[in-house]
Amino acid sequence: MRRRFPLFYLAWISLCVIAFVALRGAEDPSRRHGRILSNDAAVRALAVVGSGYQAVHVGYAKKGEAGSEDRWIVLCDHVPHTELREAVVVELRASDGSVIGVRRAELGAGALGR
């Protein structure tokens, strides 16, 4: 019985290695097809607003949620952080990451919890 365990262990590791190599180029099944990742949206938004900003939040908005297409909405604040007083919002097309618009962030009365 003791000799079977090392063989089973070696077979399991071999199977995992084969699966890892075979699936390394496959798309992540949990990721939606046809849109860029939120991390990529943040990087693209920072390229648009230039240096001196940091992406503080990235949100996905579907078509019909105050817009005519699926998009990423990236909130960028000036560094050092200004409590969103100098924040800008960059809207990117979800399918390819192209810029839809850039605007100053609108803060409501309860936006900062005050």
Image (cartoon, rainbow, N blue to C red):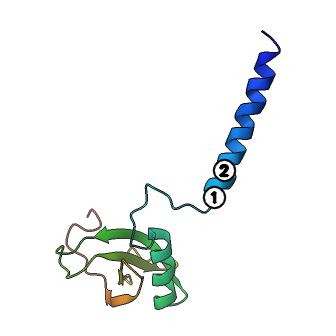
Q: Which mark is residue 20?
A: 2
Q: What is the spatial separation of the Cα atoms under label 2 and label 1, in whole angstroms? A: 6 Å
Dot 2 amino acid type? Phe
Spot the residue most to the right.
3
Which residue is at the front of the view, 77 or 68? Answer: 68
Looking at the image, residue 13 lies above or below residue 7: below
Looking at the image, residue 18 lies above or below residue 108: above
Q: Are marks 2 and 1 in contact (CB under 8 Å)?
A: yes
Q: Does residue 44 appear to the left or right of 102 in the view shown?
A: right
Dot 1 amino acid type? Arg
Q: Which residue is tagged 1?
A: 24
Residue depicted at 38% across the width and 89% down the height = 99
Residue depicted at 79% across the width and 24% down the height = 7
Q: Label 2 neighbourhood size at 10 Å, few (<14), some (14-19), many (20+)?
A: few
| Residue 20 pos. (x, y %) | 66, 50
Q: Does residue 65 appear to the left or right of 60 in the view shown?
A: left
Residue depicted at 18% across the width and 73% down the height = 65
